[in-house]
Structures are given as C-alpha cells and as structure tokens.
Amino acid sequence: MTTSVSEQDIARANAIKEEANVLFANKKYDEAVEKYTEAIEVNPNVAAFYANRAFAHTKLEAYGAAILDGDKAVEVDPKYAKGYYRRGVGKYALARYKEAAKDFRIVLKFAPNDKDAKLKLDDCDKTVARMAFEKAIASNEVVKKVSDSIDTQSIIVEDTYDGVRIDDGKVTKEFVDDMIERFIGQKKIHRRYAYEIILQARKYFSEQASLVDVEIPKEHKLTICGDVHGQFYDFNNIFKLNGRPSENHAYLFNGDFVDRGSFSLEIILTLFAYKLLYPTGMYLTRGNHETDDMNKVYGFEDEVKAKFSETMFKMFSETFATLPLAHLVQKKIFVVHGGLSSRDDVTLEEIRNIDRITKGQPGQGGLMSELLWADPQFLPGRSPSARGVGQKFGPDVTENFCKMNDIDMIIRSHEVKQQGYQVEHNGRCVTIFSAPNYCDSVGNKGAYINVTPETEKGYKLDYVQFEAVEHPKTQPYSNKFRGGF
C-alpha cells in the first residue's frame, strides 16, 4: 500500500536523499541516517530510501535497525533485490545464518550475477552445515578442548629464530619488550611461544570469578581503556603516552581487543603476555567481539588462520570463554563492556557467580549477553537496541543499579565516541573508547581513564584523549561486507 505524495514532495524527497548520499560518502553515517529518515517522512514510497538508510545503519553496526529497514524496503517493493540484500547483511552480521541465506537466495533470483550475494550465501550454507555437524558430535560425545591436547614441549624452536625465548614457560619483561618490537616490525613470535601464552592465560582466567575485584594500592595507578579493535599501532601508542604496564601501573582493557583492525593477534598476545608478567598489572574484560560469531564475520578468525593456524584460533575461542565479564574497581566503579541488564534486580554477586565458562558463547539473550551488548540511552526506562542484540537502558536504570549495589558509577565501552569518551546519566555512566579513527574512517579521538586512589572518595578519574597514529596499510581481514549492492 502506497501513500499519496505530490510531485513537489517527490522532488523534495529525492533532493534530501541526495544530501544524505553526500553525507554517507563523507562517512557521516549518523547524519546520513537522519537525512534518509527525513526523505522517508516526505515520501515513504521509495524502497531505495530504506535500503540506503539500512546501509548507513550497517556502517554504524546498528544491524537490528538495518534489518527493519530491509523489511520496509521489500514491503514497499517486493521485487527490490537491494532490500533483501541489506536485510540479509544485517542478519548475517548477527550470525542469523539460516535467515540470511533465505534473503541472499532471493537476491540471486533477481540478480543472479551478484558475486557478493553468492559468496555470502555459500558462507551461510557452509556455516549452517558446520554448526549442525558440531551439534551432532556434541550430542553424542564429550568434545575435547583443543587447548587440552596441545603439547608445547614437542614444538621445536629452530636455531634460526632470532627473537627472545621463553625458558621454562615463564614470560619475562625482556620477552614482552622484544615481542612488541617484533610486532611493530610486522614480525611474528614463534608459534610455540604463542601457544604457551594462550594456554597459560586460559588457565589463569579459568580460576577467576566472572566479576573481579580491583584494588588500587596507594601511589599506584590504574588505566581503563575501551575498545582497541585490532589497531595495534594505536594500542601501542597508549603505552608510549601513558607508560607500559608495570607492578605499580595496572591497565584494564574493557573488551573488544580483536576484529576490525588487521593486527588483532598482536594485541591479544601482548595483553595475555602482560597478564602473565604482571598478574595484578593487567585486567581484561570480555567484549561482544571476544566471541565466535563476531570473530567469524569481523576478521579475527581469518587473521589467526592466516598468521598461524585454525588450531590456534580454536585455542583463542576457548580462552575468550574464560575471560571475566566485569570488574569492580575500588568497590565503587563497575566496569563492563556493554552495560546493564533488562532486569532491575541484578546484583554484583549474581554477576560474580555467572557460569561463563560452561556457557562458553554468550548467545543473543540473557544476562551474560546483555552485559556484553547493552547501550545507554537518554530517555528513562529501557528500549530495544538498534544493534539487534541486547537493549538500551536509561538513567533511571543506572541509578537503581548503583544504589542497589552501593556503587558510584559504571564505566563501559562498546560504542564509538567522537571525543573518545562520553559522560552520561548524571555522571553515573561513562563510555570509554580507545580506537581512534576507528576502521581508518570515523575520524574520532581515542581516550583512556587514569584512576588513582588519591581522594577521600577512594579514587580520582582523569580523562586523556589521543589521536590516531600512522600504521602499515594492510588489507583488513574483515571483508564480509565488501562488494555487492
């Protein structure tokens, strides 16, 4: 059913759409969404307007909103292939492979030569088949962890290896310093040492609760960082600007270490190595990208396979499942990657006791998933998330959670912020994001928070912003959204 629209409004809507296209081309995706919305309000009868807005939503990782726009596009024009494609991409990004495959099949019905839709359909079909096979195996026998079958002692380090070595499995400062320099020069460490680091990290995290307490001793400092997303050279710049981890300077990286950027492997190995070197000098929170679904779509799986092997990726997957879900700093600051739950009665003790390791993957519902995916909103209450997973929570939700658990505030990450950070909810909710010029395109600053135990309150927060640095230009491993319509 179409709405009656005058020729004057048709022309006005098309002009607004062109303005939106210019904003999109300039990577101003939020503003583009607003302009496409304006065009739709003037003329709701054009499928392309919805498909274009869906594309902008995809760039903003608002996949739920992209799916809804795809629905609207094909409702307006059931033969509009691009509408099915945009909807399929949204479902694909959320690992809804069976549903995505249906849309890509329709795309190929209308556009049989579209190579990208064909590639995505093949990938969906293969993934669905693999998941069914793995489920069948799991139902018939106990699946042995890859990490339990690796014997690092049997892996020979050749005499030609020119890096610092790990003796007796113990990571040293000399080794970590050398490893970082190797990574800066785009060299790898020996696979034996990579395996040893991952295995030891898995063992360490497996023994921790899902909520970890962090106390900052007098004259010490804790630095809280947000998403770094495979941007190793920006990640290393944080250490240049703010000092490397040490016994009296701890870091807390709040999830999304991997995916998107081309140097995720270098970041996660550095973080794990520092955790082994300084157990109270490095804390890591699991993010929504430390999961199998995201790693498949956004590059980490392909990166690890290209640089080392599929076996190593499986070891990372098993280790990510052991990462804590949150931290409590100075008994007053709740640090979590995403945000708060859809329930009002969640306590810190409930979070502390989540059986994250048995569950493994967080899925797309429940408390564990919400901690990784939720976002704050300006309005009170809760609402569905444009991401398609998790929900949004308002200032009243934050206030209730803080009062009930006798804490001051939450610090979370998960969202790009143009200034690197944002303070919301009457100062009770802070977002910190540490990947400047995200994906080499957004132009945002990065930021981190230095926390010191200097005041009567028990802590002092200092926000530090920084710009992106030059890095080698390499082909990203996350090519799943390239090409096509």
Image (cartoon, helix red, strand yellow):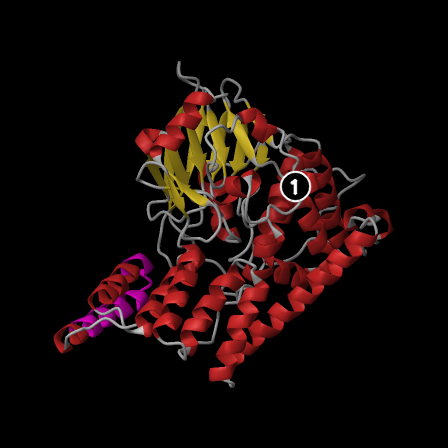
**Which residue is denoted by mark 1 in the rendering?**
273
Front residue of 151/94: it is 94
The image quarter in which residue 87 lies: bottom left
Magenta region includes residue 24: yes
Left/right placement of residue 321 relative to residue 195 reads: left
At 64% from the left and 70% from the top, the residue drawn is 125
Front residue of 153/342: it is 342
Quarter of the image with the C terminus is bottom left
Circle 1 SS class:
helix
Point out the stretch of residues depicted in magenta.
12-31
Q: How many marks?
A: 1
178 over 456 or under it: above or below: below
Left/right placement of residue 38 relative to residue 109 reads: left
Label 1, residues with CA under 10 Å away: few <14, some 14-19, many ≥20 = many
Query: In the image, residue 49 lies at what x, y percent?
Result: 30, 70
Furthest toward the top, the residue is 456
Q: Amino acid at mark 1?
A: Ala
Front residue of 469/386: it is 386
Magenta region includes residue 51: no
Query: In the image, residue 12 lies at what x, y percent?
Result: 16, 72
At 45% from the left and 42% from the top, the residue drawn is 413
**Residue 463 visible in the snapshot:** yes
